[in-house]
Amino acid sequence: MANLKPPLPRALRPKPKGPSEDNGKAKPGRKEKLAQKGISTIDWIDERTALSGGARWVMFRKIPRGTNWFYTLGSASLFAFLSQAVTGVILAMYYDPSATRAYESVRYLTNEVFLGEFVRGMHKWGSTVMVILVFLHMGRTFFYGAYKYPRELNWVIGVVLLILTLFMSFTGYLLPFDQRSFWATTVGVAINGTGPLVGPYLNDFLRAGPEFGVTTLARFYALHMLVLPGAMAAMIGAHLYLVARLGTTAPPWLKADIPADSRKDGT
Amino acid sequence: MNTREKEAYLREYSILKSQGKPFFPYSIAKDAIMACVVMASIILMSLTLGAELGPKVDPTTTTYTPRPEWYFFFLFEVLRVVKPPSLTPLAAIGVPTICMILLFLLPFYDRSPERRPERRPIAMAAAFFTIAAMAFLTYEGANAGSPNQIDMEAPEAVVAQGAANLRTWESGKQVVAQSGCLACHKIGHNGGTLGPDLTAIGGRLARQAIARTLVNPTAPMPAYTELDEKKRDDLVEFLAQLKGGEH
Ligand code: HEM
């Protein structure tokens, strides 16, 4: 409560006692001072945001016994997503989403820019790695029965993430605007168009018109750069919130050996 | 799962959880190691496999074979295998849509409380079937020639005429393959059946007649007036040499 009083001007403030002074020791060392600074900064932020409760809730929640390496596949997917975000931002600095200049900008990036091909390669192969990881992660949750009560909703969100991931790959494939990407996308969009009910509309939406034209690239660019990543980030947020709230499953073959002290939490 | 089973699960889970270790630092450490492995793989792939850029896009020619990312191969393969055009939409969109809906609703129709894989035979059988089917289709899709490929060796008559003629023949074959003729015509073992079979066209039509067909075709065949001279000549030469028989 003392914190709520209006603060004194700095000069008038009494020197706060460091923890080491309480022990009757000599002046605090440089390290301790630094630690003290860090703590007070965190306190400052926490006083205004009350974040530490949530952070503690996430970081120090218990993970059931028996979790193994397969449980890292989800966070590996997340990491691949972040890697795509970072390399994607770098690519965006050079990319020009107009039908006449897109190819040239990618060629320039690949051949002229320092480490350009490397970053493009990371983004390209990162997408493959991410798709594989997401599928493996889905397999893990399937084989462990992790989609069952109470985690049904997280499975549904997961399927949305899978579809978004595949759509990211589909829209990104057009962007280099070489023959390969153009024709694969033309065929892909045409496949979409044969779909039931919404097919033709989806088709027109993707192409930005009845023909594969100049605006198609801009549309794919906007989807790939803004809409889909935004949706994915939001969905990943919800996904992780539910993971933290519900806890990750224990391996299905693990049985709890009921200890004597379990009675006190209501069993 | 009924209420009793739900409560039993939550009770069991809370005990397992209370016996576990905190997320920080134990799980985080594993996740961090995994992140390093992921990063290393991506960097290694980028360094060894690079990022090639194909030729610049050219929408006016249909002379390019569409190839998707490899993880869409299975979809293309479904498309390739299903021949009748009336079934194509069903295969390309219908089947994936149904699979997606089944995937979405999984927790709602598989409601048994059992989680151990060995006690969920139906779920496991379905999963292995799905994985096997996707692996098979991906493999087939990766190995299948493109829908525009012509698997045909040069006939002996052409080989006998010397290297220059053989080059023309191969080049003509390429033009035919890339120009989308196979969408309607069958040549050897490849191609569709909308238009006449061209496997033995050389025995049926003279060079000029073939060339005329290209410029002034009967509907629904499109006119191929935009092909340049050399390509058209090679194409006509190739078709004129197709006498059938030996394939
Ligand atoms: C961008 C894609 C995804 C990311 C970043 C992601 C991230 C995560 C993370 C970090 C976890 C924590 C536990 C673990 O790592 O295994 C998790 C759990 C889970 N994920 Fe995902 N996930 C993604 C896609 C999916 C997909 C495609 C599915 C299934 C259709 C799915 C279903 C689940 C389920 C059911 C859990 C709970 C697992 C448990 O409690 O044991 N996720 N996810």
Image (spheres, grey):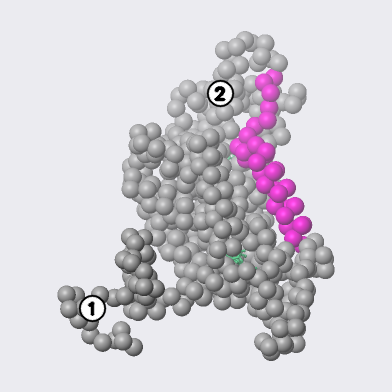
Query: Magenta segment, which residues?
Result: B126-155
Write the residue at 65% across / 16% down: B158
Write the residue at 20% across / 81% down: A8
The answer to whether A186 is drawn above or below residue A194 in the figure is above
Kindly identify the amino acid type of the residue bearing the numbered disc 2: Ser
Query: Assess mark 1: CB under 8 A from ligand 1?
Result: no
The answer to whether A59 is drawn above or below residue A267 in the figure is above
Q: Position of residue B138 (x, y in %)?
A: 67, 47
Of circles 2 and 1, which is in front?
1
For the question of whether residue B86 can be seen, the reply is: no
Q: Position of residue A30 (x, y in %)?
A: 33, 60
For the question of whether residue B74 can be seen, the reply is: yes
Local packing at callout 2 (Cα closer than 10 Å; few below 14, some 14-19, many 20+) is some
Provide the chain ID for the residue under circle 1: A
Q: Position of residue A104 (x, y in %)?
A: 35, 38
Quarter of the picture containing the C terminus of chain A is bottom right
View quadrant of ligand 1: bottom right
The answer to whether A146 is drawn above or below residue B192 in the figure is below
Q: What is the quadrant of residue B221 in the picture?
A: top right
The answer to whether A67 is drawn above or below residue B202 in the figure is below
Mark 1, residue position? A14
Q: Nearer the viewer, residue A147 or B44?
A: B44
Q: Nearer the viewer, residue A58 or B118?
A: A58
Instruction: Check residue B171 in the rendering and tell me which mark sits there, or answer none.
Output: 2
